Amino acid sequence: MRLPLPVRIGLRYTRARRRNHFISFISATSMGGIALGVTALITVISVMNGFEEELRKRILGMTAHVQVQPWQGALGDWQSLAAQLREHPEVLAARPFVAGEGMARAGGQLSGTLIRGIDPDSEAGSGGLAQHVISGDLAALEPGRFDVIIGRHLAAVLGIAPGDTLDLMIPQANVTPLGLTPRFRRMRVAGLFEVGMYEFDRSLVLMHREDAAKLYRLGEGVHGLSLSLAEPMRAPWVAQDVRALLPQPYSITDWSRQHRNFFAAIRTEKRVMFIILSLIIAVAAFNIVSTLVMVVQDKQADIAILRTLGATRADVLGVFVVQGSVIGVIGTVLGVIGGVALALNVETIVPAIEQALGRDLLADDVYYISDLPSRLHWDDVTKIGLVSLSLGLLSTLYPAWRASQVEPAEALRYE
């Protein structure tokens, strides 16, 4: 099957060794610029996808998918409420918890903490908290012993290890003959956990729910119920169902509302980075315009001869659209190959660079996530490829139109 005349000539112009080496240099630069822009865009978007997924995974491993709390005070008859919530088809578990803020002291070191009282038996098989314990076991949190499991970074700040003790103070006072004194309790560190998010590893203290209830003087009550769902992404809809199900007013929140700012910021950054890095592709596409303008100027005699042999203006326009599009297509294909290869190997390349430089590129005390995850989504690759091809095609239209307007008589007057 023979190709149309504009396609055959356009491909021949692309393969031909040009007399003007400067035009060849600009063409190669345009191709390389498009490839570089596409590679950078695919890699950056994949890394940001990885950050979003990893952040979501770690948050869901440490927080409730849906949280039910009374507007005021403690939740007394929480057993019946938990049984009622478990009847929802999407709720896997309803666990009581006690939560609050406090201050940890060990030796001369002080640090603010977030206290969370849990039921170790219900958490042990959940794959959430249990999988992050690196020293000790959740089963060590027995009621009445006042043992705690703390984050690795909090232990480093306080200078303690498993087996040591710390004083845990809460913002509630005891009335004594000497006046008001802060309420505190000496705890034994039964283990350490590490989530990989500095926010949790630096501040969270886990203890048995009954011990936490005694510390906060809740009696048999709890601060709320945390619901685990079969599909955490459906948490907003399940929260609406629970809100309609409960006969009394409760404060019901889901993880997407509690951490809305994190994920909104990531989505905004992805859009901004897409626009910024697309400008690299746009600049390279403008180089295609420069290349074709000079090619049209150089090939005016050839254009005139084609016109005298019967080629129409549309045929001439097609020749240069094909020639410029080939540059865009080759650059896009090279960029997609490079971007996919780099995005799939970022998690291997970055540690190698860190080892070569002898330093961490993502310090865990600065960033929420201390490694560089990457998640390649093929719909993003498709979108980026289409944007690159579109810019490459648009950049050919004006020079090709100029070529189609060449008058044979004027072009051949001085030949």
Image (spheres, rainbow, N blue to C red):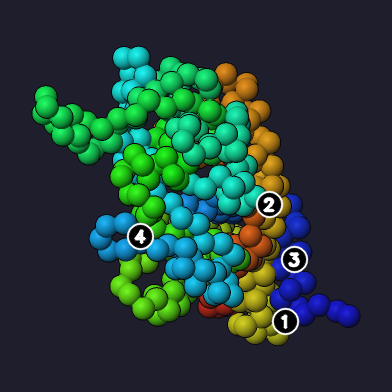
Viewer-nearest of discs 1 and 3? 3
> From the viewer's perspective, is residue 51 above or below residue 307?
above
Residue 279 image position (x, y, % from top left): 46, 55
Report the front residue among 318 and 163.
163
For marks 1 and 4 on the same chain, the one whose residue lies earlier in the sequence? 4
Pointer 1: what residue? 309
Residue lying at 65% horizontally and 39% vertically, measured from the top left: 347
Pointer 2: what residue? 340
Q: Secondary structure at mark 1?
A: loop
The numbered dot on residue 11 is 3
- Name the amino acid type tagged 3: Leu
Residue 128 image position (x, y, % from top left): 58, 48
Distance from Cα at disc 2 to Cα at disc 3: 28 Å
- Name the amino acid type tagged 2: Val
Q: On the picture, is 156 further left or further right than 90?
A: left
Q: Secondary structure at mark 3?
A: helix
Distance from Cα at disc 1 to Cα at disc 3: 19 Å
Residue sitting farthest toward the front: 177
Distance from Cα at disc 1 to Cα at disc 4: 91 Å
